[in-house]
Amino acid sequence: MAKFIVRRLLLLIPILFGVSVLIFLWVHSLPGTTAQAILGEKATPESIASFNRAYGLDRPLWEQYVNFLGRAVRLDFGVSVQTQQPVWDEINRRFPATIELSLAGLLFAVLIGVPLGYMAARRYGSWLDNVLVSSSLLGVVIPVFVLGYLLKYVFAVKFGWLPDSGRQDIRLDSPHPTGFYVLDGLLTGNIGASFDAFKHLILPGIALGTIPLAIVARITRASVLDVVNEDYVRTAEAKGLTRGTVRQRHILRNAMLPVVTIIGLQAGLLLSGAILTETVFAIPGMGSFMKDAIFKHDYSTIEGFILFSSVIYVLINLAVDIAYGLLDPRVRVRT
């Protein structure tokens, strides 16, 4: 298993190098320039030249890329032209909100989607199965922002059960050592603050996790249906094994392989989808900051954020590969 993990880690090096090239070329192909976006249309050629010189934008493109890559390996993404603060500090300040929201959406999708898909498969053709198939189609097509505003109106405005925006009640003056508000409440012994932060995640987590939930449930249902018709499952049932044993040893273990794959893919998509959800629920994550960065051609911020997100995405896929290896030892042998 150790060799399997080491091989996977070594593969990350060329992948991240390719990602860094694509990010850099895409960012520098955006129409307009940073100087024009920051200084405005009335900027003089002298002020534009001075701006470009100050931020190293007057250097050849290959030199800018080498500088970007050299800094990135040291987790130094330069200075944001919007805030004049190091991009790494901005990421540290805002990314926990985005990660926390993505985790809430992922947990919602997995903890509900997998059991629902399993139950629908075991009751194939029943009303539960028909309801799941129909509702999952609706869950896939409904846009995140439509569902988000609908949830806000019903559960926050109409009934007042849950908060409609932000990460925590502003009257709670609790410390945030990690930036993950739910975790910070537990670490500092302030359970009330932790619970309040959790309440603020419910509606955006549901809005963000509904599409992945529908996909996970459908994949789980299809995978379980395939496995339960295999000969080894029928043999296990004919041998008199209990339903729980058959489920644990033969059905779930084999049916989870495609489910784990789809969960890994959805985790990466949730990270990018969280930006839109943050806008709907006024969560101070990377969403609004990235929107301004794109409009102002804040190259350092865009490059830093996308590269950091890419690292997280490939690490999630690494975790999926490792889970694959644990679930099916043949994968470790073949790779």
Image (cartoon, rainbow, N blue to C red):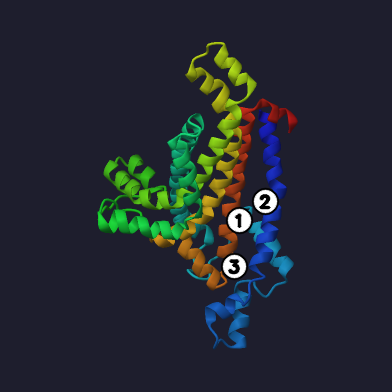
Residue 278 visible (yes or no): no
How many angstroms separate mark 1 from mark 3 (CA)?
12 Å
Image spot of residue 49 (x, y percent): 63, 82
Q: Residues within 10 Å of mark 1 (few under 14, many from 20)?
A: many
For label 1, the residue is 307
User: Residue type at mark 3?
Assistant: Tyr
Residues under numbered marks 2 and 3 in contact, where contact means CB atoms less than 8 Å apart = no
Residue at the image point whose x is 36% and y is 48% from the top: 202
Distance of mark 2 from mark 1, alpha carbons?
8 Å
> Which comes sooner in the sequence, label 2 or label 1?
2
Residue on which the image places disc 2: 16
Q: Which residue corresponds to the image point at 70% horizontal and 41% vertical from the top-left?
A: 10
Left/right placement of residue 325 relative to residue 137 reads right
Residues at marks 2 and 1 touching, judged by CB atoms closer than 8 Å: yes
Q: CA distance from mark 2 to mark 3?
A: 18 Å
Secondary structure under the numbered disc 2 in the rendered image = helix
Q: Are marks 1 and 3 in contact (CB under 8 Å)?
A: no
Q: Nearer the viewer, residue 130 or 212?
A: 130
**Which circle's residue, 2 or 3, is located before the other in the chain?**
2
- Rendered residue at 52%/62% (across/down): 86
Task: Report helix, strand or loop for mark 1.
Answer: helix
In the rendered image of this protein, does residue 253 appear above or below residue 205?
above
Give 191 or 132, whichever is nearer the viewer: 132
**Residue 299, label in figure:** 3
| Numbered disc total | 3
* Residue, far top: 239
User: Which element carries disc 3, helix, strand or loop?
Assistant: helix
Question: Residue visible at 74% across and 66% down?
Answer: 62
Q: Amino acid at mark 1?
A: Leu
